[in-house]
Amino acid sequence: QVHLVESGGGLVQVGGSLRLSCAASGRTFSDYTMGWFRQAPGKEREFVAAVNWSGGYRLYADSVKGRFTISRDNAKNTVYLQMNGLKPEDTAVYYCTASPTNALPRSPDQYLYWGQGTQVTVSS
């Protein structure tokens, strides 16, 4: 079992920045690919970014590429999502998630553990 707790969400203006953090506890953090998903009201949960166990490989959704950066600190059991150049369409609940695969999956079905989510609201 891996327990995930997100933090860092909030209200920000267009063009602003936020850094989300996700603290993990339980099983060995470095055994897992870590990902971020988001879900806006009335929409399906969508992939945002993923990072492999070492942090050496990263994958991004086209909609956030060049604006968001995913990283991890295995010594702190924490994964981060640095979000710059925020847009109103980035408004959503952001979820941290862990997958036991060595790949970088885009499908939520490939992820085993989920946090409770943190709200990000971008105002225009």
Image (cartoon, rainbow, N blue to C red):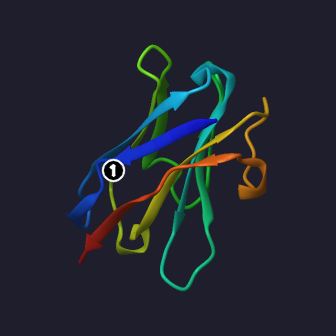
Q: Quadrant of the N terminus?
A: top right
Q: Is residue 74 above or below residue 37?
A: above
Quarter of the image holding residue 13? bottom left
Q: Nearer the viewer, residue 54 or 16?
A: 54
Q: Is residue 29 above or below residue 50?
A: above
At a point 25% along the width and 67% down the height, the residue shown is 14
- Residue farthest toward the top in the current orientation of the protein: 75
Q: Percent from the top left, x then y, of residue 63?
A: 55, 61
Answer with left or right where residue 84 lies relative to residue 24: left
Q: Determine crowd level at label 1: few under 14, some 14-19, many 20+ residues with C-alpha closer than 10 A.
A: some
- Secondary structure state at the residue bearing disc 1: loop
The one of 46 and 85 positioned closer to us in this rendering: 46
The residue carrying mark 1 is: 84
Residue at (23% x, 78% y) in the render: 124
State the residue at coordinates (39%, 70%). 91
Asked where in the image residue 52 lies, by quadrant, the reply is top right
Picture quadrant where residue 118 is located: bottom left
Extreme residue in the bottom direction = 42
Q: Is residue 45 left or right of residue 119?
A: right
Residue 55 visible in image: no
Q: Position of residue 84 (x, y in %)?
A: 33, 50
Whether residue 105 is visible to the viewer of this picture, yes or no, is yes
Residue 9 image position (x, y, % from top left): 30, 55
Q: How many labels sit on residues?
A: 1
Query: In the visual, does 34 lie left or right of 88?
Result: right
Task: Please name the amino acid that badge 1 sits on.
Answer: Asn
